[in-house]
Amino acid sequence: MGPSMTFLMFISGRAPTLQTLWRSGLVITLLCVLGSGLAFGQARPAPEVHDGSTLLEALQDAVVQIQQQAGQAVVSIKTEGRTRRSPQVGKEAPKGELPHRGVGSGVIVDARGFVLTNNHVVERADEIELTLRDGRTFKGAVVGRDPKTDLAVVKIDTPEALPVAVLGDSDQLKVGQWAVAIGNPFGLGHSMSVGVISGTGRGDLGLAAFEDYIQTDAAINPGNSGGPLLNIRGEVIGINTAINPVGRGIAFAIPINAAKDIMQQLIAHGRVVRGFLGVVIQTLSPELADKFAVSENGGVLVGDILRESPAEKAGLKRGDIIVAFAGKPVHKMQELQQLVASTRPGTSVQVQLWRDRQAQTIALEIGEMKDPEPAPEPAGSRFGLTLDALTKDLAKQFELKTDHGVVVTNVESGSPAARDGLRKGDVILEVERTPVPTLEAFQNMVRTLNPDDHVLLLILREGRSFYTILHAPQG
């Protein structure tokens, strides 16, 4: 994420009091600009005689109708969860877990009770409460989440009839068209704001792995996350996701066409399957375009090829410029990322590229994108220990006279290990009377223990060994 993008923030949050909002100077302004819709320089027909108030009332009625109809399918979301407390340096480890609450929005997209929202609204939630505009409140459960696009689906389990939003076509959006946001800002409940589409295809914001946002100046605030952005016909064209808290009138929404496929996969399978090509790509700057003898935005430059990937097997190379994928032109990194990700694994596609100033076409079979394996918890970390294998350098550093065991290289202040008297430079020889000559052996032994077990250790310190108890973390 570039340094200029650090001002962006997601827009779910905790509901402040009305006094806080008043003190902060929260002002909601609606600016309606009426235009003729004529192209610049086009001949203007003879003006029809209209009463100004009649035009304004017609626009007003259209906005009111959106709230009355589409607003029925918008839900306010409240979440509750608990996070394990982390000990502060130099202090006793706190007991228990820290509760956290959040607010957000969502939109009902299926009569069976499926609600589309943002991943960051529900990702840490243990309990989810959804409230409709008519006051009905339901418990919800997460069906699936997709952090790569910041989308999630929540299910309302009820036999009652539920209103469903109409999904529009975000590919038809034009800058200057009306945009209406409905949501739960600051936990105030169903609120509406009106603006225009300020831009499309916004990326490189550092918000998610896949970015192709709609920009709008409709007033959006914390708590609007997951709520719909609608057109003047009341159709959902986006899911409100983030704002720029520094500059007013800049907010971003995920296009509904991009969200549809994600939503359908989450409903059907609880996860998202994406295509995988295996290239590291970069944007063609004017200087790079000149060196590769192509026009700026004339494709996407391949900077590297991942080993054993579909791209490597098909013969793609560093320095290739991909200009089309499966017959669709490619001008930006986001376009290629979206095209590849939306292609079903196993599909054969044609990739058009520019190599050494010559056009080429390569056929390949798309693979499946795999989520990276979660990093294992470092051995001893839950006790506040940093451990390392015993090497000659460590033996020399700590003046150790042994060639086996696990070395304590750091003890976190206030941790269970610190309270039990372990020190930097100690060597752990045994765990529960079982020798641990290597770091791997220590890890294997610790995995067999329950989280609340107290552990018997044999420690070597200053040439003498002794037994001690390492107590389980509190809380």
Image: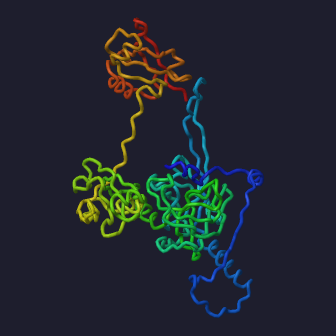
Image point 59% across, 47% down: which residue? 80
Give the left or right position of residue 205, taking residue 300 as reference: right
**Corner quadrant of residue 161:** bottom right
Q: Quadrant of residue 394?
A: top left
Residue 114 in sight from this viewpoint: no
Outermost residue toward the top in this view: 464
Name which residue lies at 64% across and 53% down. Answer: 246
In percent of width and height, residue 439 lies at 35, 23
Residue 219 position, x and y percent, is: 65, 63
State the residue at coordinates (55%, 52%): 121
The residue sitting at the bottom extreme is: 46
Residue beneath the point at 55% across and 39% down = 83
> Quadrant where the C terminus lies?
top right
Where 10 falls versus 379 (above or below)? below
Residue 455 as seen in the image, left or right of residue 251: left
**Count of numbered labels shown in the rendering:** 0
Q: Quadrant of residue 315?
A: bottom left
